[in-house]
Amino acid sequence: ETRRRVPPSRGELARVDKGRRRNALQSSARDMEAAASEEAATKGPSSPVGETLEASMRAAAAQAEKKATADGAPPAAVKAAGEAAAKSRASGKTPYDASRDGQAAQKAAQKVLKDGMSPEAAKVAAERAVAARGLGMSPMEVAKEVAAAAKATQAALDSGASPEKAKAAGEAAGNAIRSGKSVVEAAGEDANKGKSPEAAKAAGESAAKARSAGKLPRVIANDEGSATELAVGDKGGAARSSKTLRDLAREQGLTVEDVLDQVASAQPFTPRKLSSLQQQQRIGIDLRVASNEQLEEAVARLRAEVESRKKPDPSLLALQVEHISHELAVPPTRNRRLSLEHLELYERFCSRIPPEASPAELGDLVQRIAKAKAVHPDKDFPRSGDRDDGNDEPASWESAVLKVPEGRRRQTMVMLYCNLLTGPLLVLATVALLWWLLRPLSPYLFALYCAWVYYDNKTRPNPSTDRLSPGWRDASIWRLMRDYFPMRHTLAHPDAKFDASRSYLFCYHPHGVQSSGAFSMSTAASGFDELFPALPPTSVQTLTMNFYLPMTRENLMALNCGDASARCLKNVLSRGGGSSAVLVTGGARESMLAHPYHSTCVLLERKGFVKIALQTGAALVPMWGFGENNLYENMAIDSPTIRRWQQRIQRALTFAPLLVAGRGVFSYTGGLMPRRRPITVVIGDPIDVGAAEAAPSAERIAQVHAKYILAVKELHARYKEIYDPKAQPVELV
């Protein structure tokens, strides 16, 4: 008797998704082996080994190209996948690994081609992706390296360089990212091939010495990059300095051979360690026990940082100084006053300006900051041990419990309430308490309330402006929440025009874990009324499910919040009279990328808000919340498995559960409370989109979207050095 095989259900396939993909790749690898064996068999028993390897390479390339074609990849990506699989097979990798390399090359090349770059840049990106995969780097690190290499290659091609030089520029930029440098620093590495003959020869000799010492190829590449960095004498690359290796050796009283020996004896390259932002921005060594190499490396990094500060952009520096001067001149009010933490940010920014580049008004500005600190009402209170001011000494338990002023205790209790309010814990506790108090009528009252919530959400205006409560919006609880971080909203240009003749769509970046800077705009404590006296209270958009939770929905409706739907946004922006809405465009997907000092924005494919702005004629207003990502550490940032599960849950529930670590109520580590980090929401100038269009074209949407992206990048670059100097450049995904 035969038994019928029942195919697995979709649920079972989803639960074993990882194993299913592995089995598919292994099956593909077996097909490649079979094809190679069949082709080798046709050669006869006297077929040489080289022909068998060539047959295996051709089979691997054919299988990879077949899969890429089935996925709808462009021809250049198909070719890159085939070449990567063939090279992997030639290097002795198994058919399974060759198939994985082909898939990685295909994805990298496909993304580069989608961004409008050339096939040469796609080829470089594919090669970098395969090489990075062999090093065990995380997906985010691989993406950064591939993007830097492709952009450097494309930039070299656009400037008229030959394909060989463009490829070398891309490899140099990729090596810079791999060695722990930022994207801005890597931009200078594309000039590596333009260095002097002496420096080029020195880099080659360094690589040869490293190879003779038994180092791996990836270490040779790192040593070559180190030699280049020493040759130019500046962390920004050859584009910012013309020093050769001989010049640097002469300045230090060394020979070229001595410098090369230092480079060749460097420690092996560790991608994950050097990619850590803390490793890049801190020099943590013990002067008594550190080796001479560690001391020399620290001195070199300090010199490079000092040199980089000597060449600020004069126009940008003048704008930043003018901004600080204006912030100090704003008269304090109950809802808008400079915190002590923001004064310290201004003070540290001024201290980083080198004397030779200091503007004439810097001295007066420093005195004004010192005077404001001296008369600040919080100057005599003990400071929080949760600050990020460069002090590595951990705060004691006593400072977190016994020495906390009463005002900070109230702020902590408010944040505890607000955190519970946005989650299910307080909702469940409230329902359980009411269920117990209202017995035996609890089931009937609960069913009646649920029916009312459903009916109300279907029939009421969205948002419900008639339920806006001015008293609740101006409650002191929101000022305590603002001062917890502390938080400040400010205009990029004080003379920007916001009038009641049109509507505005404020777009907030980044999402962070809680979007505290965006939510605060629904309250009077943000200073919205002082910043925009001609506009009525704005409508902050949040999740639809929040309007089905007891207590939470009443709180949000009293603050005039909406449900982040297209219908709600159109209702708000079509009212006229200065109506406005606040939208966090990155959504749940961007919240999964939140991490301290990261500036990742989900914006490349998000164009729906631009379409709504064109349909309603609302001006787009970019905003950046500096410090928003610094409140929590994302524990899943380097875990692809957890990220995949978060994405699945996000697609099903429209929000994603985050695995984060903040601070505790009575401790500075290991809790779910946000850290006390200053948040500064800089509001950019409105972008006029013209008159309302019922059906804007795709070209018009793309045009406004590109203009908006440029405005976001400029806003971040202009004020990052003041409010979040350790933040990375904006990365769009």
Image: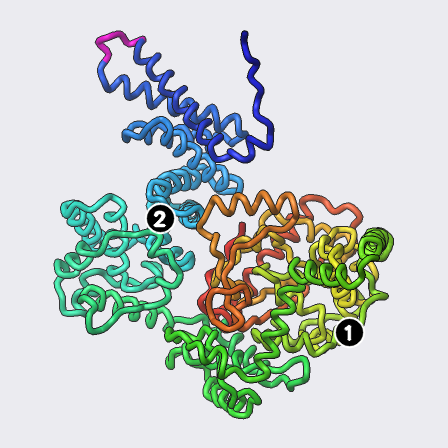
Using the rendered view, name the quadrant where residue 350 is placed.
Answer: bottom left
- Helix, strand or loop status at disc 2: helix
Image point (35%, 12%), residue name = 38
Q: Nearer the viewer, residue 93 or 384?
A: 384
Q: Is residue 682 magenta?
A: no
Q: Nearer the viewer, residue 357 or 306?
A: 306
Image point (42%, 71%), residue name = 312
Classify the position of the N terminus by image quarter: top right
Q: Nearer the viewer, mark 2 or mark 1?
A: 1
Residue 259 at x, y = what percent?
17, 60
Using the rendered view, name the quadrant where residue 188 is placed.
Answer: bottom left
Residue positioned most to the front = 440
Q: Is residue 286 left or right of residue 375?
A: left
Q: In the rendered view, tell whether residue 569 sits above or below residue 420.
A: above
Q: CA distance from mark 2 to mark 1?
A: 52 Å
Q: Nearer the viewer, residue 559 or 165?
A: 559
Amino acid type at image mark 1: Ala
Residue underneath mark 1:
534
Residue 6 at x, y = what percent?
58, 19
Residue 276 visible in the picture: yes
Residue 407 at x, y = what percent?
59, 83
Image point (22%, 68%), residue name = 295
Q: What segment carries the magenta color?
A: 42-47
Q: Is residue 417 left or right of residue 81?
A: right
Residue underneath mark 2:
169
Q: Earlier in the sequence, mark 2 or mark 1?
A: 2
